Amino acid sequence: MKSKLFILASLILLGAFARADRPSIHGMALFGDKQLFASHLPMFHAPHDYQLVFELSLQEVDTGVLEKLSNLKKTGQTFYTIEPELMDLTKIMSHEVKQFTANLYSGHFERKGKILGEVIVQVGKILLQSKLQTTGSQDNKYLVFGSNGEYFATHIIQGKPNLDHIVKVAQPFFFDIPFCNRRICPDPQQVLIDDSKLPIQLDGKKSGFNIIAPQVGESLGSGLDVNAQITEVIYSEREELSH
């Protein structure tokens, strides 16, 4: 009986290790002012084949690093990345790991970004998490999220090749069409989407089977449905998701 229990326990442990990913460096885009967000920079191969977007807060390890970040933001610099310690990203997704240390960069940490110092990342609410599938759908969808006048959208990655695209948007809205039985009717009115309704999914641009990255001034959504106008492109990457 004991030997059977030992075998069963061993199989359970082996299963747990089989489900884990090998520790690696998982670079992430960092954005937001009123609320900080991180978005894992994914690829279509293990252990980097996950899309993950979450809220976070930062604590200093190196003195003055958050002041450097604040001062750079005042100059208009908007793109930052973090280079976390070696870790298994799935443990963030399963809430087993709720904080980790990371180097903070102005710019891309692998593309001549400037290191600002070391921070502790406190993981907050997870907004999007999924394992990438090379043969997934080519639907062009964006997840729109944010609050208190600051809103963002990230492209939902499904199938290869694809696009990693993070944009800042105006507060989402829909058109309210007043009932009218007269010859001259009032114009449709824009109604802002309440923060409590977010996050939501909106359609992006698409031409045939090609996913097109929308630009500043264009909108996610369409027609009289919910829309969100793009005000800034924070990050756009195709090459890392092409193979």
Image (spheres, rainbow, N blue to C red):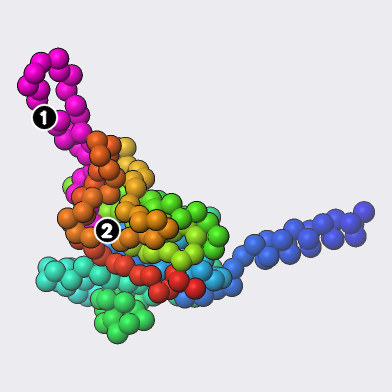
Residue 55 left/right relative to 176: right
29 or 187, nearer to the observer: 187
Q: Disc 2 marks which amino acid?
A: Pro
135 relative to 185, above or below: below
Residue at 35 percent across and 70 percent down: it is 237
Which residue is tagged 1? 187
70 or 214, nearer to the observer: 214
Which residue is tagged 2? 214
184 or 129, nearer to the observer: 184
73 or 182, nearer to the observer: 182
Looking at the image, is mark 1 or mark 2 earlier in the sequence?
Answer: 1
Crowd around label 2: few <14 · some 14–19 · many ≥20 (10 Å): some
Q: Secondary structure at mark 1?
A: loop
Residue at 14 percent across and 69 percent down: it is 76
Residue at 20 percent across and 29 percent down: it is 176
The quadrant in which residue 235 appears is bottom left
The quadrant in which residue 166 appears is bottom left
Does residue 41 show up magenta in the picture? no
Q: What residue range appears in magenta?
A: 167-193
Crowd around label 1: few <14 · some 14–19 · many ≥20 (10 Å): few
Q: Disc 1 marks which amino acid?
A: Asp
Q: Which mark is residue 98?
A: none
From where the camera sits, is residue 137 visible?
Answer: yes
Percent across and percent down for residue 198 are: 32, 42
The Cα atoms of the two marked residues, 1 and 2, are separated by 27 Å
